[in-house]
Every structure is written in C-alpha cells, then in structure tokens.
Image (cartoon, coloured by chain):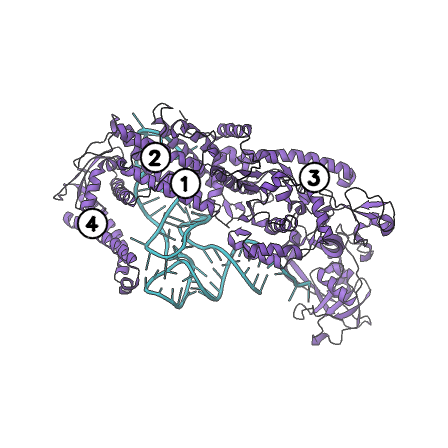
Amino acid sequence: MLDKVYTSRPVEEKWSASWRAADLFHGEPRSGTKPFVMVIPPPNVTGALHVGHALDNTLQDIFARWQRLLGRPVCWVPGTDHGGIATQSVMEKQLKAEKLTRQMLGREKFLARMQAWTRQCKSTILGQLERLGCALDWRREAFTMDADRADAVHEAFKVLWEKGLVYRGERMVNWCVRCGTALSDIEVEFEERKGHLWHIHYPAADGGRGPVVATTRPETMLGDTAVAVNPKDPRYQDLVGKTLRLPLAGRDIPVVADEYVDSGFGTGALKVTPAHDPNDFEIGQRHKLASVAVISPDGHMTAAAGSAYAGLSREAAREKVVEDLKAAGVLEKVADYPHSVGVCYRCNQPIEPMLSWQWFVRMEELAKPAAVALDSGRFRLYPESWAKPYRDWLSNIRDWCISRQIWWGHRIPVWYCVQCHGERIRTDFHQVAAARGVLSVEAPGSCPVCGGAEFVRDPDVLDTWFSSALWPFSVFRWPGRTAELKFFYPTSLLVTGYEILYLWVARMQMMGLALMGEAPFPECLIHGIVRDKHGKKMSKSLGNVVDPLVMMDKYGTDAFRFSLVIQAHPGKDIPFAESSITGSRNFANKLWNSTRFVLMNLPPAGRKAYRVADLDRARLELCDRWILAEYQATLSLVRQKLDAYDPAAAADALYGFLWDKFCDWYVELAKIRLQGQGAGRMEVRPAGAGGTSATAGGPDQESARAVLVEVLSGTLRMLHPFMPFITEELHGALKPFNGVKAGFIVEAGAPELSGDWSDDEACREMGTVMEVVAALRSLRAQLNVPPGLRIDVVSAGGSADVRELLAKRAGYLTALAHLRDIRHSREGTRPPHSATAVAAGMSFYVPLEGVIDLAQECGRLRKEIAKAEADLSKLAVKMENKDFLARAPQAEVELARRQYDAARGRLDLLGETLRMLS
RNA sequence: GCCCAGUUGGCGCAGGGGUAGCGCGUUCCCUUGACAUGGGAAAGGUCGUAGGUUCAAAUCCUACACUGGGCACCA
C-alpha cells in the first residue's frame, strides 16, 4: 500500500535510473515514419542551470513525451554550448582568485584549463537535466566545440567564404574594454543612465570667440579633429571653414558643415571624435578628417591624449579633463542629462566604439530567405506576436561582427603571410590592413601571392553564436551526409526564450536556409523569462536567484515543473514565488492519494483489467456518465491546447479536472458504491423517495471500479508529460488493473475513450444534484450544524423532472450533504422549527429543533433574498430590454429567459418562506 | 522618437461580446476509513480613465494615463 504522503526523491531516482537503463529516449532513423525532433538550446558551460533552463527544458520535455505518447519516433538532442566570452569570464575570475591572468598562463595552458572546467560543468548540467526528468536522447549528446562541431564550423566558414559572405574589414566596432573584445551590435544593450551634458567653449585659433559644443563624454575631446555644424544653421554660417584651437590639447581643428548635425540639439555645434564615435567616424570619412585614438583597447588614455592624461582610465581622464577645462575657463555649463548608454550584455560595462579590423558576415543576402520563410508560413513563431519584431529585425539587418579577441572558441581558420603584411601583423594585428588571408585549418605551406612560408594564424575566435547557429544540423554531424541528418533534419520544433530570438533563432534560420537549403525548424515556441515574485529579473547581484535543485529537493521535481508550466502562459513572463510550488506539490499529493484510494478499493491484483469499453453503457450510473463525459472533454481540450503550444492551459485543465471533478465529486460518490455494503456510516438509507442504484455490491461496484481505474489511468498518462515521475510510479501501480501492457507509461499511448461519451443530460442532471448539495451544505454551515450530525431534509415543490431526479439520486444527496434522511412532501408542508434552502426550483426544509431561532432564520433569509434580488435585477435589465428581445439571437433570449425564470422562482420561494415565518 | 504587450478581488494570474474565473492569502467549521500537502462554507472585484460601436462591452474600436519590453537614437 502507498504511504499517506508522496515522497518524491526515491521515486525520481528509481525512474531516472530505469529510463536510462532502458535507453528509453533514444531515437534511431527508421523509414516510413515522420519523427518529432528537437534540439536543446544548449546551456553555456558557465556553471549550473537556473530556473530559466528548468522552464525551457520542462516545456520541451512536455512536447517530447507527448509526441512519444502519440506514438511518434522522438529525438530530442541534448548538449551544451562553450559559451565564448561568458565562459572565459568565469575562468578569468577563477584565475584572478589565484592571482593569475590568462596571459600569464599562455594560450595553451589556459585552454587546457578551460577544457577541464568544461568537462566538469557539462556533467553538472547534464545531470541536472536528467534530474529534471528530461527525455533526452543521451547517446546524441553534443558540445558546440567538440570535434564534430568544429568540422561544421570550418565547413560553414568555408562555404560562406566561398560565397563571399564573410569578409574582413576595418569598421567602428562595439568594444568592451573589460572583456577585451569586439561585440556584435545585438550584444550591446542600452541602459538609461544619469549623466551630464558639458558645454565647452572652443575658441577660434586667432584667440577670438568660437562655438560652444555640448558633450556627454568630455574625455574624448582630446581626440577631436573638427567641430561640425549644420550647413543651414544661420548662427554658424560664418564659422564654417574657420579654424579653432582645441582646448587642453592646443591643436588646431577645422569647423566643417555636415547635414548630420541637428541644430536643435544642445548648442548646434558638435565636437567630432572620429576615433571614438560611430557617427563622428562617418563625419570624419566625409570630410577626410584625421582620426586620433585617445583611448586604448584596455580603456586607458593613450599617448596621443597628451602626457597629462596618458595612462589614466577613461573615468579618471573624464574627471581630470573637466577640472582642467574649468581651470582654463572654457567650461561654460554643466547640465544633468539622463541618456542611454550602450553596455556589454555580459559584463554591463559601457561600450567603447573602436576602429579596428574584424571579421563580418554579410547579412542582407542571408536574411532574405529567412524573411521569405516567415512570410510564406514555412516558419512560424508562437505566439504570433513575435513575428513582427522578428520580421523587422531581418529587414533592418546589419553585418554581423563574428571575430572575438578572446581565446575560448573556434579559432578563425585563416592565416596571414608575414612577408605580405609585414612584421607588424604579429604585434598589432587588429590595426593592420589585412582584408584576406589564406583559408586553412592547418598552417599553409606557402603564400599564393609571394611564395613566403611564414604565416601567423588569425588570433581571434568566432562569436559563440556562430557555432550555435549551426546547431540544428551540426548535432547530426553535418557536413557529413549522415543517416541521422537525413532523417532528423529539419527538426520539428524549437523552444526557447525571447531574449535570444535574434541572437540565436534568427541566425539558425538563416544558416539552415543558407547551408542546408531548408529552414532548421518550421515552428518555434517563444516563452517568457522566469522572474522573481515581484517581477524583477533574477540576478546574482540582486540575490533573488532561485536554485532549481533546491526547489526539486524541497518540493519534488514534478511539483517544481508543474508550477513553472502552469504559469507559462504564451508570451508572458513568469513571476516565480516559492508559494506557487506548494500548490503543485499539494496537487502531486492529491494524485498520489486518489490513486491510493482507488487501489484500496480494488480486489487483489491481477484478476482482470478494468476497462470502460467493457461496460454496458445503458447500466451506468449518472455520476459515471457524467465523469466520463467530463473526462473525454478534458482529454480533447488538453490535446487542443498542446497542439496550440499552450501547455499552461493544458496543465490547468488537467488540474481542474482531477481535483475539482474527479476527486471532489466522482470519488466521493464512488465511495457509496465501493464501501456502502456494510460499511457503517457510509451506509445509504433508502429514503422515503425510494431506493437508489447507489447501493453497493455486484455489477455496480465493478462499474465504479472500471471508471475509476480508466479515468485515473488516463489522467495520469495525460499528466505524464508534465509530471513524469509521479505519473510513472502511479500508473505503474495501476497496471495490474488497467490492462496496459507497455513497460513504461510513455509507451502506453495517449489516453482515449473510444466512441462519443459526451452526455448533456448527465451533465445537466449532475449540475442539479451539485446545486442542491451546495445549497444544503451552505445551509448547514450557516446554521453551524456540526459536520458529524446527519440531518433530515424535507423537500417541497419543484418540477416533476427535478423531483424524480432527486428521488432517484437521494443517495448522492445523503452522502454528499451528510443527511440522515431526505423525503419529499407532496403537500409542501414545512416542518416546525426548520430552516429553508432554495435550490433547483424547490425548497428544502431542515427541521432542527433547538437550533433554529425564528428571528435568526428570518435574518438569514433576508440576506439570501437580498442576494437573489441582486441576481435577478441583473437578469431583469436584459429581459426588460425590448431591443434585446427583438434583436438578440433566439437561443440567447431563451437562455436569458430560463435564467430569469430560475432567479425569479428562487426569489419567490425565499420570499414566501419568509412571509410564512413572520 | 517608433512599435508591441500589459493594466481584472489583498498578492500572482486566466478569460476575451451574453449575470466575473483560478491559485495563494483571509474568516468560520471539521482530524469523517484516499489525502490536514485534506474537506466544507464564506468574505472580497463598478475588469486603468474617457469616449465610441452594439440589443448587449471586462471582452471590439479610438484616444489618454501608467507599467514592462523591443527597435532606433542627438553629441
């Protein structure tokens, strides 16, 4: 027998081990079937998984397991990402703790440490995914930087190279001085920060008055090579072409006219620093201005900034420049000025625009097919609201900077002839004009241009997203023409968060189309991010990070998963509070105990399989017909919601069905039949209105068992994708009774009731029973009748239908409202000292001598009347509206009339009762 | 600046033309033979504001406000 409370850990360990031992989730190519394929968004090997991963992978697991239940071959590929800058930063932090730098170790030793770290991290992550229950194809584990993936990267680079889609060029790139590397445009985030607008007077070279420029970055003035004004600005007409004397530096710089300048902003005069601002760079190009780099790649001032500033950090230089300007009497004004600052998405440090030689991918040509795929419906995003931003991004695409000045990554397979480029290529790589080298993974033999034999390899590595972009086919060992690539590509669905829609999803689409000729996945489910309970983003610095392992230990994996999923409404972020897991844990326990109940009421195992299909439908009880109708409706709703990629709604439907319908009503009614025979307090007293089919024993008991077993087994199977462990355990426990042969639940097939079990009549009749039960329970509570006390009830009035129904189902009322006896009074006589409940168009008198105080009962009735009146008046508005009666659809009018009549009837009955009492 | 989403009981969220739903919390009663991680009863909302469409608006439309996000950016 099961324990009273579900203990998750041993169950999870048992099934994880069994699934793995059975190699249950491995998928092999086999002809004639269309597989369901997903590739995991590979987590970075930066540490352990967070709740966001837990959500992402739970969602994928739901679809993987659901498709398995549907009988499709499934392949869900696990793996990890080397994570470029992010992972290198983690290692550099570790080194720092040992008072080391990567330069001190040297490239080779550093990479060896990275490999060791990666091995350790991978096993942590994969272990966590298994702990989470993920039905991953473990034999296909891949890593974005292993040998197979390196082949894919080299091939992709080569193909793009041959098509002229990768190129090296000197551009103004986003430089992170902390990470020491260039970044792509989408790796720059903009943050609103408080700053100042400094107004500086630039005197004319002859000593006369010059323009005042406004800047947010005074330290860059040391690198100014011009001042620009709008050619149409009347204030500055005379100034164009004049020469100014740059304060502090003492250099002479020209005033140029450029359309770019907005005369409405600041003073209308713009200082131009071509080396440190992308717009100034463009102005510099147009006017052939010199470019003076005053900030070095490590964020300190260069010699060109002047001896007073060289070596200072950007921040310190700013302070000193401001001070010096003040001292020189040219600082005219300082205003507070909040503005957005571009920062590194990894380390949050302000980006420094820098001019350097980098590798780029030409994107326009790649983006077009991706846009066509979207427009033609060959690629769909869920929810659809992401389509427009995705489309806009593709249309406004800019070239992708793919070279990174770090060590951890796929090294760019290009070599440069030292003889052609000069010795400087060794020391000043990013400043040397080298548009093209020799494409090769190994050192080339001789230079095709000069025959020289000395080469330096490009020191840079590729953006980590370059290898990620190939993931849907690199995991199947492209460029090899493998059987699995043929069978599993394109994949079926990609599930990920919106924060990497452009970084990853779009790039996979583009690379898949370019290199495979087909979109890597036709559908993509975009989910929100998991936030803390206040809606704030989780971050280590805020200290609001939730550790999935802790949650799984504390509440069980199934509960943790379920709480995430039930809140994962399409397109919405999830505010995650621990209290929401307790609800799911309680639900798991409810499942546990409802199964426990069913098992307790079955004969010794193995006798026979209980199946609804074997039952004589005509002889089923009302509650059987009702729960089967509800069950079937739930199954179809859940299927529909899963098809629509709305697992939250599916989870909610299952939760409500199991708890509110199956447990609260069906199980309670089944008790009458299962335990009624000689079961003391459960005994049903055939009331005045006659016997009931709900008495225990024989075929009826067997019907109840069959319905319990089938509905519960099916619900467990339907819940399995959401809560894999507990459902495996419980479904297993029911196996001797439910006729399922399959070894594991996932092989048992999706639950289904053959035939149409919808039953409006049963639902209507159960609705009436429930209404009466609720009214009687409410009355008991209002009168403080002790729950243990069985009361007598006399009913009066009502339609013949309802009277007959209640007479037939008196056993239901007796059990659920805890009655001793219920009988109908043909004359409608109200017993003395009784309270009255009104429901289903009739009165229910509860005689309670000594309990009922006349005045109190009148007060209670008045309250009920007030509620009934409010209810009625809402409906009356409708019925009194002639336009409604004339114009609304007839079915609507009829419905409203029925509702009105019912409310009217209820109010009348209550009023009548009150009159009789007073 | 442009675009998108949201604004529903104390909190977190569903719903999306026809008398407002869920979970948590709150109040009262109950250790009854599945489950106190439970059962029963109850309180609590003019669905952001102002207009409009409609027989009927929380739901559709238009403005506005606030919140969040994306994109662009003027120093």
Work out whether disc 4 and disc 3 sit on a shared chain. yes
- Chain for mark 2? A
Where does label 4 land, which residue?
A910
Residue ID at (46%, 41%): A580
How far apart are the two marked residues, 2 and 4, measured between alpha carbons? Answer: 46 Å
Amino acid marked by disc 4: Leu
Q: Is residue A694 left or right of residue A146?
A: left
SS at badge 1: helix
Where does label 2 land, which residue?
A613
> Considering only vertical position in the picture, is A366 above or below A255?
above
Please tell me which of labels 1 and 3 falls first in the chain.
3
Where does label 3 land, which residue?
A91
Percent across and percent down for residue A864 are: 24, 49
SS at badge 3: helix
How far apart are the two marked residues, 2 and 3, measured between alpha carbons? Answer: 62 Å
Amino acid marked by disc 3: Met
Q: Are marks 2 and 4 in contact (CB under 8 Å)?
A: no
Pick the residue in front: A693 or A152. A152
Residue A196 visible at all: yes
> Considering only vertical position in the picture, is A19 above or below A352?
above
SS at badge 4: helix
Question: Closer to us: mark 1 or mark 3?
Answer: 1
Please tell me which of labels 4 and 3 falls first in the chain.
3
For the N terminus of chain A, the image quarter is top left
Image quadrant in which you'd find residue A274: bottom right
> Considering only vertical position in the picture, is A823 above or below A225?
above
Work out whether disc 2 and disc 4 sit on a shared chain. yes
Please tell me which of labels 4 and 1 falls first in the chain.
1
Colour given to chain A in the rendered image = purple
Residue A655 bears which disc, if any? 1
Colour given to chain B in the rendered image = cyan
